[in-house]
């Protein structure tokens, strides 16, 4: 079996959770861009060190560096039969570069899954996060509440909402994502490899929809 899949979707769409589970099920690595960059920086590879320079400055890592790292990652032995890419590509330029890269490696994308989640639901998910001031533990007012509201289960510290998780900041993040991603969706739609799935509802139902979309349905 060989399976190269991209999970696309706004922050809060639940891509990471699904990518973790399904990549394990399919026996391919879950490649999340952020983790990949941090790992390469930690290992100190030439590209990793270059990425680190930008991350240390809080700047965006340029496309050619990210693409180079994705290329190296996809050439590693555990990725011979495929990968679930999560958080990459983000732009059409990156998507084109990824296509070239896969062609050079003699492979191609099998499917792009877009997690469609309504804006009110995304806002609810993203603004519900609370972080402990003491130990950094994270909670969610709806999906993972502490035993006592506002108080950390672990250290009794005070929970707070990060500035990034306030409604205004979240709305801006979602706008940026939408603007950036709609041409990308169009790009994959034209190539007939895009499947939109409903990213709301039970985790198991979302997983089932993804399995069907990539032709890896589990026989019941
Ligand atoms: Zn705590």
Image (cartoon, rainbow, N blue to C red):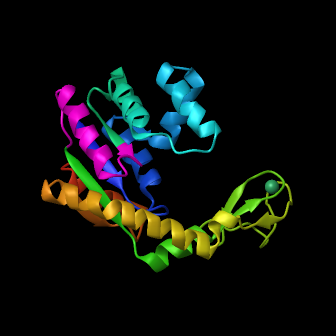
Task: Please state the total of marks drawn on the protein image.
Answer: 0
**Whether residue 181 can be seen here:** yes
Provide residue 47's location: percent of width, then percent of height: 47, 25
Q: Nearer the viewer, residue 215 or 94?
A: 94
Please say if 110 is above or below 29. below
Please say if 110 is above or below 169. above
Quadrant where the image shows the N terminus: top left
Q: State which quadrant residue 158 falls in.
A: bottom right
In the image, residue 103 lies in the stretch drawn in magenta:
yes
Please say if 27 is above or below 216. above
Stretch in magenta: 85-109
Q: Is residue 179 left or right of residue 193?
A: right
Q: Is residue 24 left or right of residue 130?
A: left
Residue drawn at (77%, 73%), measured in percent from left and top? 149
Q: State which quadrant residue 190 falls in.
A: bottom left
Q: Nearer the viewer, residue 162 or 124?
A: 162
Q: Quadrant of ligand 1?
A: bottom right
Q: State which quadrant residue 8 falls in.
A: bottom left
Quadrant where the image shows the C terminus: bottom left
In the image, residue 214 lies in the stretch drawn in magenta:
no
Residue drawn at (34%, 21%), measured in percent from left and top? 77
Q: Is residue 71 left or right of residue 156?
A: left
Residue drawn at (33%, 34%), measured in percent from left and top? 27
**Whether residue 220 can be seen here:** no
Q: Nearer the viewer, residue 76 or 64?
A: 64
């Amino acid at each position: 079996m060989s399976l190269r899949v991209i999970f696309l979707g706004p922050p809060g769409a639940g891509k990471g959770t699904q990518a973790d589970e399904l990549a394990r099920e399919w026996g391919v690595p879950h490649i999340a861009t952020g983790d990949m960059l941090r790992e390469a920086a930690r290992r100190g590879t030439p590209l990793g060190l270059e990425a680190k320079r930008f991350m240390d400055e809080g700047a965006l890592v340029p496309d050619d560096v990210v693409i180079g790292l994705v290329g190296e990652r996809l050439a590693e032995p555990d990725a011979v039969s495929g990968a679930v890419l999560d958080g990459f590509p983000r732009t059409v330029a990156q998507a084109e570069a990824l296509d070239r890269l896969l062609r050079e490696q003699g492979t191609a994308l099998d499917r792009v899954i877009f997690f469609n989640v309504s804006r009110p639901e995304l806002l609810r998910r993203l603004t519900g996060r609370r972080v402990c001031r003491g130990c950094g533990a994270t909670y969610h007012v709806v999906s993972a509440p502490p035993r006592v509201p506002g108080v950390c289960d672990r250290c009794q510290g005070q929970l707070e909402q990060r500035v990034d998780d306030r409604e205004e900041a979240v709305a801006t993040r979602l706008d940026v994502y939408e603007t950036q991603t709609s041409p990308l969706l169009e790009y994959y739609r034209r190539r007939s490899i895009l499947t939109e799935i409903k990213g709301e509802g039970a985790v198991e139902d979302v997983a089932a929809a993804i399995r069907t979309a990539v032709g890896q349905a589990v026989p019941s």
